[in-house]
Image (cartoon, rainbow, N blue to C red):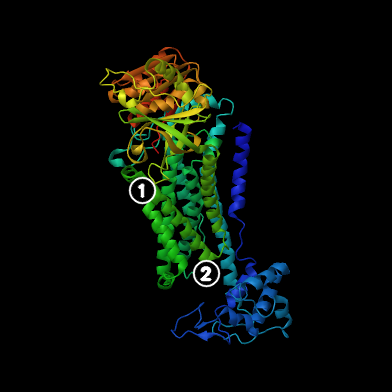
Amino acid sequence: MKFSSTLGLACLLPGLVVALVGIDTHPFSPPCAFACGRAIASNMLSCSVHDASGGHMHGGPAMTTPQCRAGDTAYLTTLAWCISTKCAQYHVPSSRLEKYWEEQCTGDPAVAPKWDYSTALHNITQPPTRELAKDDVLDFTALASGAAWDMQFRTLAFLEDEEALHARYGVAILVTGFAIPIVLTCLGYLPYMTGILERVKPYLVYPSAIGTYQVRPLPYLLGNAPTIGQSLYVALMVILNIILTAVNYRSTQPHAWYANQHQEVMAYVMYRTGTIGFALAPLVILFSCRNNILLWLSNWPHSTFMLLHRWVARIFGIQVLLHSILALALYRDTGEYPAVEKLKYWIWGAVATVAVSIMLVASGLYVRRWSYEIFLITHIVLAVLVIVGCWHHVELEFHRQWGYEMWLYAACAVWFFDRMARVLRILKIGVRRAKVANVGDGFVRVDIEGIRWGAAPGQHVYVYFPTLNPLRPWENHPFSVLPTEMLRLSNRSTSARNGDIPSEHNDAEKHGGTAVRVRTALDDNTTAGLTLFIRKSTGMTKSLKARDSLFTLLDGPYPSSPAKSVLRCDRLLLIGGGIGITGLLPWINSHSNAKLCWSVKETAECLVQAVDGALSRANEKDVRVGRRLDISALLSQEVDSGWAKIGVVVCGPGGLCDDVRAAVATTGKKGKAIFELEVEAYSW
């Protein structure tokens, strides 16, 4: 994407977010009218019914129904007179007063009063002179208590200001989290910034924050360590959340809702943590998406967004838990908890909180390693429960008056866009038939005809084999893509020498290392085709076996990492291990000065023979069977050769990827050469 397009979107999106969440929502508009209704709401009417249980409703010893208010003359005239006199000084348009009257007069928008606002005013024959006391039965046209009105007006106006502040802080956190990747990408286009960023990368971008762990999990499967640069992003988001959760609380006492300052401030903290939690929800979902717009607006790789997804989700979870704990403490302090805990809005909020708590525990690496499919299904189910629970929580309590539902609209829009894009990708080019051949020693080759986008480097595709396991047709995994055409040289020579020899008759041990060769699925009239080399493991890949036609769905291609900066280097060093060769071979066709270094175990020698046609395209290569690569020596050799800018792409086991990352960071700090590092590990 061009710089101008990226910058334009970066400027436009924050404005769209601000418009979406509705910072200017005013649920108590006009506040003068709302204060009138609340100032007289606790007084009994002639039609009020005493609560036989002795309970209190709206602060009074009686139950007043909307139907009662709708037909009570004294109530309607008192409310109309209060609105007329109190709102006059604020020059509120008559249309807004009529709107309040229609929607709020009886306490239920579905129950209309017997008179409209103008008619109620006309039915006041003489201006009222008697002020309504707290314990009076409202059976006459009265003056609303000035003290009660003042307290209600001040409370409502203050609450609106507080909610607007909470919304602004939520937008600030969301926009910051979204904009950082774009801003840092745009910095690279500024004059003189390229050189500065290149020198900074060995110190901030490449090194791990914890030893050399990055792709490899931390001890005891505690997760994947972020790089130093990723840690700075996480730290910024944590600090921003702490600051914006903790600052700018005010109090207005006496308060119409809370008896003391402690309860009032606790309520504001509760509301703010809830708002910030809602604001983080779209970001959490966006970072986990395959169709993440930031993959195209920034030069950050997919693996970085997946790591940040987990960290931002933890911040989101903490805000949700704080909101729930504070709500529980507040309602216990006010004595309302026994009644509140039975309300549907509270129950749905509890459902969302429990679901978030389970997700925080059940999303650990230990669970993902134990059974990724179970993790994925439960993760999606719990995420749906969170969204549904949050929706009912705010819908039943606030009836879309405060704009909280806008955050949920944004979160759902991100999720639905991603899922819709996946389906459209599959329907467009992804419904295929694949040819599967055994390569040997637990490896298979999958050829898919008619695909023309496999040649570009730095891509992966999600592959479904729905018929392999009918009980789990949704199961899919990411694979590096390789254009089948790259393998044709090997296959032609193989056909001339051996014919179409089935792979099961080419045992390397029985034939002294004779190569296992499989004919390409392509004919000589096309170069369109995609090949996957897959190491059979647990789950979906375990069931793969040789067949000529396997129903296959492809979701892709997706960028694994940005290729542009690497391809601009003077020298390209490709380092791979085992099956990681499939992620490296497309780079050979994209750079004129590339060197391939590949190490495989002796048990995987069949892979070397299977890709010998593609290997022949590399001008320089170092292929080792049963021997490890000396990463530091490889880098030193390239530096000593005098290359000014060296691109390094590594794809393979986690240990190899982490060793290359550490070696590039160490060598890059010496300053003799500039390095561009891309790691393709699929360790999400």
- Corner quadrant of residue 167: bottom right
Which residue matches tag 1?
A: 374
> Which amino acid is tagged 1?
Ile
Asked which secondary structure carries label 2, the reply is loop
Whether residue 91 is visible, yes or no, is no
Q: Badges 2 and 1: C-beta atoms under 8 Å apart?
A: no
Return the x and y of residue 654 as percentages of the image width and height: 34, 32
The structure residue drawn at horizontal position 47% and vertical position 62%, both measured from the top left corner, is 265
Return the x and y of residue 653 as percentages of the image width and height: 34, 30
Crowding at dot 1, Cα within 10 Å, few <14 / some 14-19 / many 20+, comes out as: few
Which residue matches tag 2?
A: 255
Q: Quadrant of the C terminus?
A: top left
Q: Is residue 179 above or below residue 45?
A: above
Return the x and y of residue 254 as percentages of the image width and height: 52, 70
Q: Is residue 602 above or below residue 22?
A: above
Q: Which mark is residue 38?
A: none
Comparing 143 with 174, the one in front is 174
Q: Is residue 52 above or below residue 452?
A: below
- Corner quadrant of residue 123: bottom right
The structure residue drawn at horizontal position 31% and vertical position 18%, both measured from the top left corner, is 514
Asked which secondary structure carries label 1, the reply is helix
Tell us which disc is closer to us: 2 or 1. 1
Total tally of numbered discs in the picture: 2
The structure residue drawn at horizontal position 70% and vertical position 77%, both measured from the top left corner, is 116
